Image (cartoon, rainbow, N blue to C red):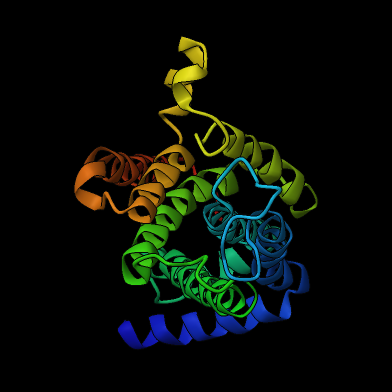
């Protein structure tokens, strides 16, 4: 079974690379965001420039790495369902958990690859701007991506066809960035929106990554860690009930 899992993961990796929109978007979009807004926020030495973005640029780019992974997941799943590939995969000896786990592993691998590209770009163009505990930040991004990916499976269960996969996913995910607390404090929102925002994985992802960034660490953000894990468990449980293989 484990051998089948790794074979399927390798196949899904090649499929992902050959899917231009998903591959290019996942790697290029966060990099473009980082370079454009980074040029406003950082000088050549990594110090703050005269025009400063009113948010943490690397964390916005990292958040878009996670969101791009989810978008590509929803698109691939909808294509597989529409073309009957999911139905055929389910008929193989591989379990549904193995089939879906391969999708998750591929996205997590490319999350690490995208972050590595950001780090290389940061050291090249904005020396000193990424002065952060990179292993801890990578772990925070991976946990955040895993939690948001679980929401992606719920979205993938509801998307009717591949034609509508990207717009529907964007309609779900990108408003969550606005309510994440990256651009303004959650406390400024009206109470109903504040409650809603605190139920979103992006909010807790930003909180955890900011905690790693400012040095307060995981211990000061255990609530966000617990929320990300809880959201993952709830979304996976919901997916098992509503996911459609054909």
Residue 239 appears in the rendering:
no
Q: How many marks?
A: 0
Q: Quadrant of residue 184?
A: top right
Which residue sits at x=31%, y=83%?
A: 2
Q: Quadrant of residue 207?
A: top left
Expressed as whole percent of the image width and height from the top left, the position of residue 201 reads 44, 41
| Side (left or right) of 67 relative to 194 | right
Quadrant containing the N terminus in the rendered view: bottom left
Q: Residue furthest right?
A: 163
Q: Which quarter of the rendered picture does the C terminus lie within?
A: bottom right
> In this rendering, does residue 205 appear at all?
yes
Relative to 123, residue 213 above or below: above
Question: Against 7, is 31 above or below?
Answer: above
Of residues 98 and 13, the one drawn nearer to the viewer in this rendering: 13
Task: Point out residue 38 in the picture as x, y percentages from the top left corner.
Answer: 66, 59
- Which residue sits furthest left? 219
- Return the residue nearer the eye: 109 or 215: 215
- In this rendered view, identify the residue nearer to me: 111 or 58: 58
Q: Foreground residue, 133 or 20?
A: 133
């Amino acid at each position: 079974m484990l051998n089948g899992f790794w074979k399927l993961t390798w196949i899904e990796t090649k499929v992902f690379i050959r899917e231009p929109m998903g591959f290019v978007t996942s790697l290029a979009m966060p990099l473009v965001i980082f370079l454009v807004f980074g040029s406003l926020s950082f000088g050549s030495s990594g110090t703050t420039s005269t025009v400063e973005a009113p948010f943490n640029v690397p964390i916005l780019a990292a958040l878009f790495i996670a969101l791009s992974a989810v978008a590509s997941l929803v698109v691939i799943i909808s294509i597989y369902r529409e073309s009957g590939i999911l139905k055929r995969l389910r008929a193989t000896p591989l379990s549904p958990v193995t089939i879906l786990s391969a999708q998750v592993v591929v996205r997590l691998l490319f999350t690490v690859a995208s972050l590595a590209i950001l780090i290389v770009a940061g050291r090249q163009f904005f020396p000193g701007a990424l002065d952060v505990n990179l292993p801890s930040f990578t772990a925070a991004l991976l946990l955040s991506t895993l939690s948001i990916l679980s929401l992606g499976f719920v979205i993938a269960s509801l998307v009717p066809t591949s034609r509508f996969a990207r717009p529907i996913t964007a309609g779900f995910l990108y408003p969550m960035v606005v309510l994440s607390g990256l651009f303004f404090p959650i406390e400024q929102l009206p109470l109903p929106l504040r409650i809603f925002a605190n139920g979103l994985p992006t909010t807790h992802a930003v909180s955890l990554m900011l905690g790693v960034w400012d040095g307060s660490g995981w211990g000061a953000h255990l609530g966000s860690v617990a929320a990300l894990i809880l959201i993952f468990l709830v979304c996976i449980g919901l997916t098992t009930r509503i996911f459609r293989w054909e």
